[in-house]
């Protein structure tokens, strides 16, 4: 295939009108036609059409597209192509743009969005930076919206399983950012049987299917009766029933296989071959030798090929070529396109023909296509194809040059994953190419190429690969290497090591880098070496060094105008100078850093600024101010294709954590499910941590098993933190103090290093473990086991002392913020409970401390406060606290907390004071939701599914409703609710 656009030719092979009938797809056709009708009315829709190879996806889309055209819609199709490991950035969208550009109706829309012309090869500006990539994406969205205003638009994307990462990113942007508000439908197909567990399309599908306008339609194999109908419709003459029956049995519901098996019955042998490849080649082998030669050549080109390119590659006179093409089209192996191209009617047929080529024949034809494409001029968008053909033809020198050209093109159009792939291909070829034949000039050598590949990998979020590539660059450095290059390699490696929590090694390399180049005269290399060294020094506790170097380097960066390094240094100073990111000066520095980074186009530095702005708000207790920074940060990461990189992952965790703290638990669970369809095994699995906190608080002890799975594989700091919190709290909820203390201690040990011997989370872990310890000490004291109680009291003292030390001094020597102080207040109250018994004053302080916004922890402290009030004889106050906790527990679906407060009410005989007689007034908002579904006849399981809670939690709510309404059954409760106006009848369909 080729991206270059040849002029239209007249008089070529006509399009043959034979069309495979659509059989057994009536329901799917009706559904898709209905969606098109809604799209024409302005209610845009998208469909992800899944099915095995050959099941009929393309035929169904062709039928729907025909109906759309008949109804006045514009239909444009973009194909994704399998070229092995070659990445063609934005390929299907380039094809779509080519079709739109050829239609005079849309000239005005294209002129209004010139940025998209980059995908057609016009312009040379780079869109690697986040703003350029965003402008490209927004330009494409704006163009499609304006096209849809001219005429309703159906966008068809075929074979999405072969899509390059940049195309996947653009599709995510289009469907998630408003393009579906117009008269537009998007139908995208993919092979379900090709999606292995780690296929890159899987996370995108999981994300898209959660968007309200997006649906998934699975095209299942045809029923035997439908295959029978299809076979008889394809064959005009009578067929023996035995033949039809054998075809039906062997096709297994696959329309394409059925058609090929039917064609195979015409073979001279009269039999049906046993292997699938043989079945697919039967129709091919019935062609003339010339037609077979043309098809073999076309198979090397790809699924689709231009007429002129095919003619030059096959080397036949025009009349012979046209005759062979007419034969191939007539036998339904090729399809003639409107744009003077030919396509294999099915990818499986092309794959079978290609696989049947002899090795020498395959290499010769690839070489022919490579030379022909090169002869057309080195068009940037064809570089990836040329690289592919040169490699397959074993012309490695030309493959190297074309791979570098393809990497440059990928960089210009903002496709870092494809850029990395092409660069790594070039590195693979480098040693095999004679030095005299390698590209010369421009500073191109193996080390700089490896550094560039490392940068592309980091930009694409492949952090461990970035580390491996920089280590490789370091190994390539010779003894006489330029000092600036040697320093660049080392500080780049240091930065990449920091991203994967290898801090000591990072500091060693950043120190080496800074020592290799002088500060005077000032240089960009020294500034970046210093900026990286500041980060590394900070992570290993060399705070004075970090501050001294940061202040000095900031002045140099300002003098040289290196704005992205200036931004990076401002962030470092904002985090650990003065009051840090929680203070007004720190926030001012961070906002300035964000603006500088955005202006310079350095997306990773911009994301670092946004993350620290969000963290500063969180640490200061300003939870509502935290959310906008997180939203902005994740949006920028999405636009830059960096959602899997370090800071966006931590922003995802922080976003869920804020939802958890604010008590918006259902939102937290939904967001976690949308963010990570494959956790906890997938990279960044720790980001679902707050969802595990919710599950545990709702009584799902299986959350502990899911947390333990986060500890499998290589060490991950955040995953260890999340697992430690869940496993310590789970042990406390089970009443297992030994296990709680063990998990607390082991987690602190795992997270500690020389720079930070006790991480900040120590305070929270100590408070959670102290809860179990205090329970154990209290229980033993009640049984008269003073020795056992003293043992746990000693443990409690050890834990609270650790909490005090960390909360007071923090990781940077300053006191922790509101969250840390709240956990310390709880730890102090639990310590008093363990050593002396419940203390109302201590628990009152804990309640006040958590008033900054943590709904669940506030309620947990109020239970203990109520318990202490009961011990002090203040039963009326205790009843008020218990009633407030009950409402919170019910709203959150926190079943264990509800059971805990109910037990306290029974022990303290607080039920009379709790206001239970006012049954209507005591229904919580969540109980009212449950009651409404109860009235609709829902089961506990169905109630749980609709409200995103467990069936067990729904059962607790139902029991509470029965008790509050003094009802003996669900039906009686509904009757009482109707009678007292707690719910109103649902309107009927006729109403």
Image: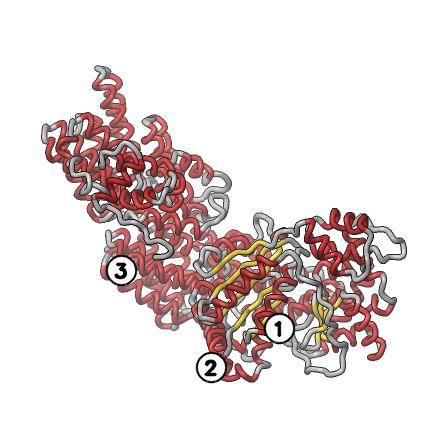
Q: Give how far apart the Cα atoms at labels 2 and 3 are.
A: 41 Å
| Residue at image location 49% in from the left, 53% down from the top | 206
Image coords of residue 53 (percent x, y): 67, 55
Instruction: Determine whether 193 is above or below 398 in the image.
Output: above
| Residue at image location 46% in from the left, 58% down from the top | 491
Mark 2 vs 3, N-terminal side: 2
Given the current orientation, which residue lies at the most extreme right position?
268
Task: Return the residue nearer the eye: 717 or 383.
Answer: 383
Other-residue count near label 3 (Cα within 10 Å), few / some / many at <14 / 14–19 / ≥20: many
From the image, tell me which residue sits under label 3: 586
From the image, tell me which residue sits under label 2: 112
Q: Is residue 476 left or right of residue 560?
A: right
Quadrant of the rendered image containing residue 774? top left
Answer yes or no: is residue 719 visible.
yes
| Residue at image location 81% in from the left, 62% down from the top | 284
| Label 3 element class | helix
Q: Is residue 618 left or right of residue 527?
A: left
Give the label, 1 or 2, closer to the camera: 2
Task: Tell me whether the residue at label 1 lies in contact with that at label 2, contact meaning CB atoms closer than 8 angstroms.
Answer: no
């Amino acid at each position: 295939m080729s991206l270059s656009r040849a002029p239209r030719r007249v008089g070529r092979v006509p399009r043959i009108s034979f069309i495979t009938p659509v059989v057994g797809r009536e329901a799917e056709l009706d559904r898709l036609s209905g969606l098109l009708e809604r799209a024409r009315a302005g209610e845009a829709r998208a469909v992800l059409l899944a099915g095995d190879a050959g099941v009929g996806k393309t035929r169904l889309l062709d039928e729907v597209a025909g109906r759309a055209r008949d109804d006045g819609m514009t239909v444009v199709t973009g194909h994704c192509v399998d070229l092995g490991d070659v990445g063609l950035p934005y390929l299907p969208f380039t094809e779509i743009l080519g079709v739109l550009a050829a239609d005079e109706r849309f000239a005005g829309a294209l002129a209004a969005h010139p940025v998209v012309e980059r995908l057609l090869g016009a312009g040379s500006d780079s869109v690697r930076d986040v703003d350029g990539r965003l402008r490209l994406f927004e330009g494409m969205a704006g163009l499609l919206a304006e096209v849809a205003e001219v005429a309703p638009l159906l966008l068809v994307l075929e074979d999405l399983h072969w899509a390059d990462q940049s195309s996947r990113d653009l599709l995510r942007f289009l469907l998630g950012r408003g393009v579906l508000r117009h008269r537009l439908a998007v139908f995208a197909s993919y092979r379900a049987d090709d999606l292995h567990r780690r296929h890159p399309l899987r996370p995108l599908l999981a994300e898209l299917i959660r968007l309200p306008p997006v649906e998934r339609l699975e095209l299942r194999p045809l029923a035997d009766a439908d295959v029978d109908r299809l076979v008889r419709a394809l064959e005009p003459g009578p067929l023996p029933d035995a033949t039809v029956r054998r075809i039906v049995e062997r096709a297994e519901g696959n329309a394409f296989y059925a058609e090929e098996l039917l064609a195979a019955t015409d073979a001279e042998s009269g039999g049906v071959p046993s292997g699938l490849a043989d079945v697919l080649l039967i129709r091919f082998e019935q062609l003339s030798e010339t037609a077979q030669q043309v098809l073999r050549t076309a198979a090397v080109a790809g699924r689709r090929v231009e007429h002129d390119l095919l003619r030059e590659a096959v080397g036949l006179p025009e009349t012979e070529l046209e005759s062979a093409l007419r034969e191939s089209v007539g036998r339904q192996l090729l399809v003639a396109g409107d744009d003077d191209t030919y396509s294999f009617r099915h990818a499986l047929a092309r794959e079978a023909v290609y696989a049947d080529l002899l090795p020498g024949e395959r290499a010769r034809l690839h070489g022919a296509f490579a030379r022909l494409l090169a002869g057309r001029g080195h068009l940037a968008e064809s570089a990836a194809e040329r690289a592919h053909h040169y490699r397959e033809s074993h012309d490695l020198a030309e493959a190297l040059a074309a791979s570098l050209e393809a990497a440059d093109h990928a960089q210009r159009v903002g496709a870092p994953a494809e850029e990395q792939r092409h660069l790594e291909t070039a590195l693979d070829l480098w040693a095999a190419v004679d030095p005299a034949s390698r590209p010369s000039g421009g500073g191109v050598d193996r080390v700089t190429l490896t550094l560039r590949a490392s940068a592309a990998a980091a930009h694409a979020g492949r952090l461990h690969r970035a580390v491996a590539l920089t280590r490789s660059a370091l190994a390539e450095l010779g003894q006489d290497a330029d000092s600036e290059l040697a320093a660049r390699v080392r500080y780049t490696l240091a930065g990449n090591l920091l991203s994967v929590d290898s801090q000591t090694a990072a500091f060693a390399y950043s120190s080496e880098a800074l020592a290799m180049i002088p500060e005077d005269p000032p240089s960009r290399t020294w500034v970046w070496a210093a900026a990286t060294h500041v980060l590394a020094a900070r992570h290993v506790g060399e705070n004075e060094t970090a501050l001294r170097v940061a202040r000095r380097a900031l002045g140099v960066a300002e003098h040289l105008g290196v704005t992205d390094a200036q931004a990076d240094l401002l962030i470092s100073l904002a985090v650990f100078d003065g009051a840090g990111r929680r203070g007004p000066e720190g926030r001012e520095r961070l906002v300035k850093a964000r603006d500088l980074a955005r202006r310079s186009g350095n997306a990773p530095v911009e994301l670092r600024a946004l993350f620290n702005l969000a963290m500063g708000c969180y640490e200061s207790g300003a939870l509502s101010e935290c959310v906008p920074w997180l939203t902005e940060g994740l949006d920028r990461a999405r636009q830059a294709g960096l959602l899997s990189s370090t800071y966006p992952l931590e922003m995802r965790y922080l976003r869920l954590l804020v939802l958890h703290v604010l008590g918006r638990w259902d939102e937290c669970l939904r967001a976690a499910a949308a963010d990570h369809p494959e956790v906890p095994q997938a990279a960044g699995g720790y980001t679902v941590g707050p969802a595990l906190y919710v599950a545990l608080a709702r009584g799902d002890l299986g959350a502990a098993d899911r947390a333990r799975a986060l500890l499998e594989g290589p060490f991950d700091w955040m995953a260890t933190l999340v697992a430690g919190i869940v496993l310590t709290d789970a042990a406390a909820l089970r009443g297992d103090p030994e296990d709680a203390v063990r998990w607390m201690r082991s987690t602190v040990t795992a997270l500690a290093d020389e720079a930070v011997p006790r991480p900040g989370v120590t305070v929270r872990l100590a408070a959670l473990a102290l809860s179990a310890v205090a329970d154990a000490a209290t229980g033993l004291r009640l049984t008269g086991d003073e020795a056992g109680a003293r043992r746990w009291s000693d443990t409690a003292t050890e834990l609270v002392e650790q909490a005090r030390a960390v909360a007071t001094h923090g990781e940077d020597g300053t006191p922790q913020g509101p969250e840390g102080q709240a956990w310390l207040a709880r730890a102090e109250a639990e310590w008093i409970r363990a050593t002396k018994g419940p203390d109302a004053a201590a628990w009152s302080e804990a309640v006040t401390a958590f008033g900054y916004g943590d709904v669940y922890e506030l309620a947990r402290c109020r239970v203990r406060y109520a318990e202490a009030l009961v011990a002090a004889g203040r039963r009326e106050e205790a009843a008020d606290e218990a009633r407030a906790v009950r409402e919170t527990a019910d709203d959150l679906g926190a079943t264990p907390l509800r059971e805990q407060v109910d037990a306290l009410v029974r022990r303290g005989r607080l039920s009379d004071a709790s206001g239970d007689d006012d049954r209507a007034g005591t229904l919580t908002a969540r109980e009212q939701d449950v009651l409404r579904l109860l009235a609709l006849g829902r089961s506990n399981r169905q109630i749980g599914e609709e409200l995103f809670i467990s069936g067990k939690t729904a059962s607790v709510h139902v029991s509470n409703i029965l008790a509050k309404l003094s009802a003996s059954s669900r039906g009686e409760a509904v009757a009482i609710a109707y009678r007292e106006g707690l719910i109103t009848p649902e309107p009927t369909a006729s109403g």
